[in-house]
Every structure is written in structure tokens, then in C-alpha cells.
Image (cartoon, rainbow, N blue to C red):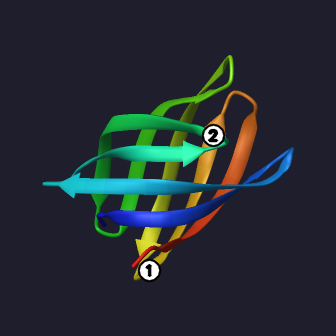
Amino acid sequence: MSGTFNVTLDTPFGPQKGVLTLTEKDGNLSGSIRAVGSTSLFSGGKVSGNSFEFSGILHVALFRFRYTAKGTVDGDTLRAVAETGSGTFQMRGIRVS
């Protein structure tokens, strides 16, 4: 599960590219997401098999967006859904070698 992924998040403003880093240890998940010129850390996530879930706050300029992401990693492919107060957004990514 651990790894770095180049991701694309489908938003109302069009596709937003970013980098998601996942670090798994004993079923616990932490990491960071870098998008829209900002990096936000998260911890307290969970891993079960190839599925994951984590929550955090993405800081964009003067705004803060709470989110919960749920998804899977199959080989080098990540697929997820991010739920926010502004809607639900699809996320996809490829592991960086």
C-alpha cells in the first residue's frame, strides 16, 4: 500500500493534479497530499487488504476543506473517492517508480 502516486482529482474547476504519499504500518495509514500549491498531512487512516480510508484538511490559499478519501490500490493503480462539504470527487492515480 505504501507509495507515492501522481493523482488527478476531478473537481468543479476541472481536473486538478497532485501527489499523494501513503505510508502504511500495521494497518494504519498516514501521509500527505500535495495539490493546488499546498501540502497537507494526514494520519489515523486505515488499510484493509487493498482498500484504504483517510481523512484530513486540505489548505488551499485562505480556505480549508475537510475531506474523507476511500479507495483501493491495485498494483500501481489508485482509485478513490474524496467526499467534502462541497461534493464528492473522483480521484485516480499511478504509482511513481
Q: Residue sitting at 47 percent across and 55 percent down?
A: 20
Label 2 Cα neighbours within 10 Å, binned few <14 / some 14-19 / many ≥20 = few
Q: What separation in Å lies between label 1 and label 2 (alpha carbons)? A: 25 Å
Is residue 30 depicted above or below 95 in this figure? above
Q: Residue sitting at 47 percent across and 35 percent down?
A: 40
Indicate left or right for 53 with 34 as reference. left
First reached walking from the N terminus: tag 1 or tag 2: 2
Q: Quadrant of the N terminus?
A: bottom left
Residue 48, x across and y down, in percent: 29, 60
Q: Quadrant of the C terminus?
A: bottom left
Circle 1 residue: 76
Under tag 1, what secondary structure?
loop
Query: Residue 73 falls in which quadrant of the image?
Result: bottom left
| The label number, if any, that marks residue 60 in the structure image | none
| The residue positioned farthest toward the bottom in the image shown | 75
The residue under label 1 is which amino acid type?
A: Asp
Residue 60, x across and y down, in percent: 65, 29
User: Does the CB distance between marks 1 and 2 fall below 8 Å?
Assistant: no
The residue under label 2 is which amino acid type?
A: Gly
Circle 2 residue: 37
Mark 1 vs mark 2, foreground winner is 2
